[in-house]
Amino acid sequence: MSKTLLSAPLATLEQGDDFIRRHLGPCANELPAMLAAIGVDSLDTLIDQTVPAGIRLPAPLALGEPVPEHMALANLKAIAGKNVLKKSLIGMGYYDTITPKVILRNVMENPGWYTAYTPYQAEIAQGRLEALLNFQQMVIDLTGLELANASLLDEATAAAEAMAMARRISKVKSQAFFVDEATFPQTLDVVRTRADYFGFELIVGPAAEAASHEVFGALLQYPNERGEVTDISGVIAGLKTKAAVVAVASDLMALVLLKSPGELGADIVLGSAQRFGVPLGFGGPHAAFFATREAHVRSMPGRIIGVSKDSRGKTALRMSLQTREQHIRREKANSNICTSQVLLANMAGMYAVYHGPEGLRTIAARIHRLAAMLAEGLQQASFALTSNTFFDTLQVATGSKTAAIYTAAQAAGYNLRHVDGKALGISLDEKTTQADIAALLQAFGATADVAALDTTVAARGGNLPETLLRGDAILSHPVFNTHHTEHEMLRYLKRLQNRDLALDHSMISLGSCTMKLNATSEMIPVTWPEFADIHPFAPADQTTGYLEMIDGLAAQLRAITGFDAICMQPNSGAQGEYAGLVTIRRYHTSRGDHHRTICLIPKSAHGTNPATAQMCGMDVVVVNCDDSGNVDLADLKAKAEQHADKLAALMITYPSTHGVFEEAIREICATVHQYGGQVYMDGANMNAQVGLTSPATIGADVSHMNLHKTFCIPHGGGGPGMGPIGLKAHLAPFMADHVVAATGSEDRPNAGQGAVSAAQFGSASILPISWMYITMMGARGLKNATEVAILNANYVAGQLSTHYPVLYTGSQGRVAHECILDIRPIKAATGISEVDIAKRLMDYGFHAPTMSFPVAGTIMVEPTESEDKGELDRFIAAMISIRHEIQAIEDGRIPADNNPLKNAPHTQADFIGDWDRPYTRSEAVFPLSWVADNKFWPTVNRIDDVYGDRNLFCSCVPMDELAN
Ligand SMILES: Cc1ncc(COP(=O)(O)O)c(C=O)c1O
């Protein structure tokens, strides 16, 4: 052993930067070759050639030194330890649950599930597509409707989506929407915000009066926020005779026992699937469910998984009706939903698979039994309940004893809902025990014997109205009746996981999506009980750890973005856009500028931008791009001037979706400001900015940060995400607040601005991921990550440019953190499209880059900083090999309609079946020497999209069909 290391300074041996080199792909000895390959002598030179000098940060980010992984974990553990773990019986849409450990470890904590992307490439996503189909089937069964989507962001936004959908399908002229006053307050808050900008009048009142109003739709809650279970079929019928569309917010666990809202007449049913095994997490992430009748499928928001067939006629799953999505329909979109809650929907669906109908009935019946026992005990002690029919929630008239009982319960370890000065709410859940009932009764000063209460309640058969007990079969598909032992469940989860290509297999170079490393140390805190088991509306003195972590992350994000304030509420990028534009509208209104409603959006923008603008009541004016992919400055100036009186905002992505740092960005922002508008920066491409420039530096007023891109929250197969917004000081007073809970440690008073998400900090339990990332990287590591992301993109662009034209570069020939490869000339010459290339990449073990965004007929590659030279070279080799295959078609050496690209992806069935193709089996499935070492087998052949949309089928496939 060399003596040098033994004599080295201790500081070197400490390896304080260790995480930086674990996060970054290229190691020190790979850098020279990569730099040489693109013709620069250093990273600094590359960055100078890429990022305009005028927008560079003058100083390093005001963040600390990198903290080693184990120390960052210890620091965060100490912060988490400041949260106080009590049993929260607050309810209001959030209930404690037992996450089956087999699901916790093999889905929630498993990179095979959490590092996948949204299943656009369906042939290599059959596992999570099946899991999502299970989720949809479960929702269909429990809601009693015909069709469900594969999740929305949370219950409150799902309710707002239901209102918007009701407007789309209702023929009633009135612009009024009715909301049951017994709807969760945070749901009402979010619906109110949405209604404001859609221009709807909101009528809030008792459900019984709903039908007396002229409304296009109504939202009821069943069981309602007070826990009451009443027959709403009469109200629904009354509303429907007046042609109103009726949405019902409901609770999946209650629906296991109760007649479904579908049976009671509802057109739309929504709610949260949280209590099906997903931890409370201080408010999220949780999957919202959303179901409707088949007739309304085209008006439904969100993604729907459906059944189709592959080129061998085999059953195969895919996302249906994708043309309804915001990517395509822009301001005509049904909604701006993009990222949703796939990982959590998968967990909830698997909870039903694991327990099955009998298991769920037992869990629900037990919860109800305990609630009824508690009710009986309280009534025996002369406490009055708001309702004698309930599922799990009691509202107890406590009068002058309210404060004393609340405090006694807390001292005994229980958080109750503080309804008002005269009543307390108690919601029981799967974790509640008989001992809890005894302790709760004691807190109320009641002395009943729990066993005797049980006997009384059992004899009575509980407190659900007989007429509302569910009579139909639920979850009868075999998938819910097969995997009930842990072994079977484990193997089912593994079987599905094996069908999906995620980051644990190979690089996923999706442009604009930033599929970078989701380090294990970042993920570990998410499931710590100190973070996972906290109710969002727990008393503030029990959540100081959360607030410290969130404040810390907000400070980190302020340092990175240059903004003055952070709003941590939006739970996706598109929600961030919405929160940002709403803030802008409020700002203008505060200055008397109600009429400022024009939103300029470059042609190259992501579809969520115009979709969001339209949700905020804005009119979109599209700005052209020039031949180099930049915003056409002359067009922007002309349009800003033309609309000067009404200009509200510009939405701009930076670096642009074309993958370049536009040099005129400052001038663009100044122009918008000159005409009274505000600049909203879509932060999807922040990965190219951190440490080099910032949204505030370029001139933005507000911007969202996709924590699920730049800041390492994994994509979860299509969510969760977090899209907090950063704002300049003048906008900060107008950012979202929350009607139930404070939105910051300074206890910003609820100024009635209105919420954009159900929980005050959106999906708070995944925020530790970004906290850990920023803490472990420090200022130095973050800047280095950006530089390497730019290096990797330029390396890929450089290596591939002679095979595929790189569509756009900056003035010095550089791309930013991603590059667009133009496939259109290839298509013109050979008929081979970007889709064929995407499918062929699967045979090489790679996920396709982003397709046809922002330019149709192209692919956009974003390698991120986390891929090393070896992986980049394998991807490059695959792309070059594919180009040679295309050349063979071009040269007439292989038919244009029967070649490895048109027949891709190739499956084991191809490999072992009859073979009459003009290329070998080996060329088909092992096209390069290293592929066999790490072969990924797509489980289905090319899926027929048209068949799937024409023969829409969005529930679990009958077993006999599968057997065929
Ligand atoms: C440029 C851009 N803007 C907005 C979005 C929407 O973000 P989210 O999916 O988090 O809602 C995306 C998503 O990929 C995007 O690429």
Image: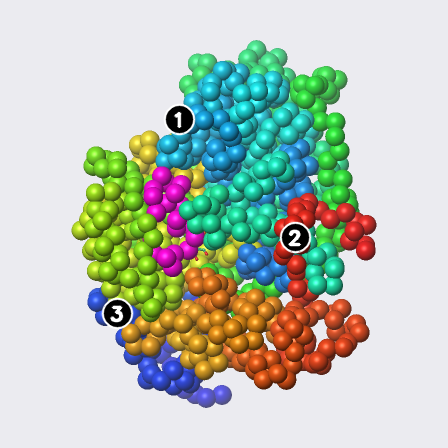
Label 2 and label 3: CA atoms lie apart by 47 Å
Does 606 appear in magenta? Answer: yes
Query: Given the current orientation, which residue lies at the most extreme top position?
Result: 382
Query: Given the current orientation, which residue lies at the most extreme bottom position?
Result: 2
Query: Given the current orientation, which residue lies at the most extreme left position?
Result: 674
Can you see residue 238?
yes
What colour scheme does the image use? rainbow
Which residues fall within the magenta stretch?
A: 601-620
Residue displayed at 43% across by 53% down: 607
Residue displayed at 67% across by 54% down: 947
Mark toward the start of the polypeptide (1 vs 2):
1
Residue type indicated by callout 1: Glu
Which of the two marks, 3 or 1, is nearer to us in this view? 1
Q: Residue 803, position in %: x, y?
A: 48, 80
**Mark identifier at residue 258:** none
The answer to whether residue 957 is left or right of residue 841 is right
Label 1 and label 2: CA atoms lie apart by 39 Å
The answer to whether residue 906 is left or right of residue 634 is right
Q: Residue 581, position in %: x, y?
A: 33, 44
Q: Which residue position holds label 3?
A: 52
Residue displayed at 22% across by 56% down: 637
Which of the two marks, 2 or 3, is nearer to us in this view? 2
Ligand 1 appears in which quadrant?
Answer: bottom left
Q: Which residue position holds label 1?
A: 201
Mark toward the start of the polypeptide (2 vs 3):
3
Q: The C terminus lies in which quarter of the figure?
A: bottom right
Q: Is residue 882 above or below residue 818?
A: below
Q: Which residue position holds label 2?
A: 948
Residue type indicated by callout 3: Pro
Q: Is mark 3 on a helix, strand or loop?
A: loop
Q: Is mark 1 within 8 Å of ligand 1?
A: no
